[in-house]
Image (cartoon, helix red, strand yellow):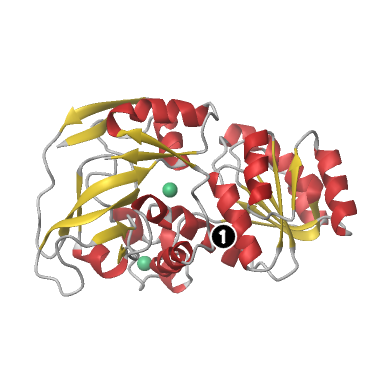
Amino acid sequence: MKAAVYTGKNKLEIKTIADPELKKNGAVIKITGCGLCGSDIVKLKQGNLLEGNVLGHEITGYIYKIAENNRFKVGDRVVAGHHVPCFNCVFCKNENYSMCRQFKETNIFPGGFSEYIYVSEKHLSNTVFKIPQNLSDVDASFTEPVACCLRAVKRADVKPDDVVLVVGLGSIGIIMGQLLKHFKAKAIGCDLLENRIKIAQELGFNAVYKYTNDQELSDFIKSDFQKEGADKIFLASGNAKSLSLAFSAIRDGGKIIVFASIPTDEAGFSNNEIYYRELNILGSYSPSPEDLKKSLDLLEKNIIKVDKLVSFYDLKDINSAIEDTVLNKIIKAFIKI
Ligand SMILES: [Zn+2]
Ligand SMILES: [Zn+2]
């Protein structure tokens, strides 16, 4: 089968590799498409992957081969989460599922940027879901990113009428704002790019600002929402400057949720602001099986709309998809397979 294979830092090549085999109690899924995630691009840039690796986890497809199973049959359209927690360890018991050792060890094989993948029985019982009839494959491929956002909203304990700033209106920021609205919070967005600002406005954010400087944005929030600052701030941009904006726009005692990877040497650490202002800073990373299920439901009910975010590419053009994403020519690439 064809797959986009990692061959070195920032390098993917389309190669023919062996089809995944059907092993006991698992299934082979024919991939119809896979979303290109910001984390795929971070991994490519860092270049720590093993050669031969295949990236891609926001998959959608249908059951192609399956061992005896009463939940799925050949032909079922499905989405699959790539990691499965054990539900038993200290991390799982504290709902830090993505820290669970089994979570980290389980994966789909080889990866979503290929024609077929193998999923284990653990996946089938926990993180593989049938796609509802009225939901397209591309919309369903957002199950994992929406679930990541859902988890972050839960971790931040977002309450009705909270004034929440989303820094960075890429696909994650746009999804986050819609979720905040769903939870009856006031969703504020900021970005540098007009096309993203426009989409956020169309999708009903309470306010969307074009970023000029930290002070101006903080003043806008204070005057437009009659607040001391944002109650919560989600950092959905990989730009290190978003940290200083967060410290400027957050109210004393507020929560900053780190939701994007920033190179450590650029991030810095504002110890005294956290201390004297009693700020809460927390990370949110990867969703639980329950979050995946709920997010598929939110997509099916059209509560989260993703159609304005997507640009389509064939597998052979995956490097253009990556380049266009990095250059902000597009918001989110869906690789058709
Ligand atoms: Zn992802
Ligand atoms: Zn566990």
Residue 159 vs residue 290: left or right? right
Q: Position of residue 102 (x, y in %)?
A: 31, 61
Image quadrant holding the C terminus, namely: top left
Q: Position of residue 213 (x, y in %)?
A: 80, 35
Is 280 rendered above or below residue 272? Answer: below
User: Nearest the camera: 138 or 95?
Assistant: 138
- Residue 168 visible in rendering: no
Residue 238 vs residue 325: left or right? right
Would you name the residue on which mark 1 appears?
152
Figure label count: 1
**SS state under label 1:** helix
User: Nearest the camera: 168 or 240?
Assistant: 168
Residue at 37% x, 63% y: name it: 134
- Residue 269 visible in rendering: yes
Residue closest to the far front = 134
Image quadrant holding the N terminus, namely: top left
Q: Position of residue 202 (x, y in %)?
A: 65, 49
Residue type of the residue flagged with mark 1: Ala
Ligand 2, what quadrant?
A: bottom left
Is 185 rendered above or below residue 212? Answer: below
Is 140 rendered above or below residue 212? Answer: below
Residue at 46% x, 61% y: name it: 299
Mark 1 crowdedness (10 Å alpha carbons): few <14, some 14-19, many ≥20 = many
